[in-house]
Structure formats: C-alpha cells, structure tokens
Image (cartoon, grey):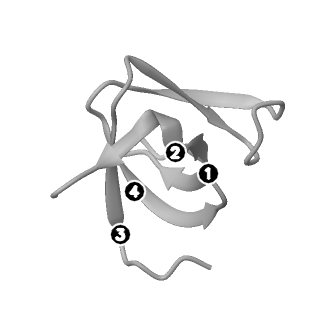
Amino acid sequence: MFNSKNEHKIVSTSVASIYSKPSFSSELINQALFWESIIIYDINKNWYKVKQRDGYNGWIHSFYLTNSEI
C-alpha cells in the first residue's frame, strides 16, 4: 500500500475519467476537471487510487495528472 500521507496531484487535462478499478475497461464512476486537486491513496502501476474533494473515490491513470506543491 502507498505510504505517503495525503499526497496531492493536479489534473492536467480538460477532463480526466475516474474508474472503479485500475483499468480503462472498468466502470466509469466520475470525472475530474482541469486543475482539480485530488488526494492519492494508493498506486497500482500507472494508476492512482484517488479521493476527490466532493467524496468520490476511484482510480485515475497517471497520464491525466501532474505533481502538486500543495
């Protein structure tokens, strides 16, 4: 399991899909918007398990994210 406490990343694309599992073929559960800050809870290869500020949890591919200095 990922150890960094409350690491944040920023969405770097206009829309980033968030999935129920770390796979593009899994259920799409929400989307994050450009410059949205999200909290990272776990990593699985190129996927991050995230929590959005509105409470949604899911998996987002690293392609959609950039580092944050929050």
Select label 4 or label 2 by which is in front: 2
**Residue, disc 1:** 47
Upstream in the sequence, badge 4 or badge 3?
A: 3
Picture residue at 40% right of the left edge, 78% below the top? 4
Instruction: Report the amino acid beneath label 2.
Output: Ser
Upstream in the sequence, badge 4 or badge 2?
A: 4
Q: Which mark is residue 39?
A: 4
Near mark 1 (Cα within 10 A), the count class, few <14, some 14-19 or many ≥20, is: some
Element under label 2? helix
Quadrant of the image containing the N terminus:
bottom right
Picture residue at 51% right of the left edge, 53% below the top? 50
Near mark 2 (Cα within 10 A), the count class, few <14, some 14-19 or many ≥20, is: some
**Residue, disc 3:** 6
**Spatial distance from mark 4 to mark 1, Cα to Cα?**
13 Å
Considering only vertical position in the picture, is 53 above or below 8?
above
Instruction: Report the amino acid beneath label 4.
Output: Ile
C-beta proximity under 8 Å, tags 4 and 3: yes
Near mark 4 (Cα within 10 A), the count class, few <14, some 14-19 or many ≥20, is: some
**Residue, disc 2:** 62
C-beta proximity under 8 Å, tags 1 and 2: yes
Considering only vertical position in the picture, is 60 above or below 16?
below
Select label 3 or label 2 by which is in front: 2
Picture residue at 30% right of the left edge, 35% below the top? 36
**Spatial distance from mark 4 to mark 2, Cα to Cα?**
13 Å
Upstream in the sequence, badge 4 or badge 1?
A: 4
Upstream in the sequence, badge 1 or badge 2?
A: 1
Select label 4 or label 1 by which is in front: 1
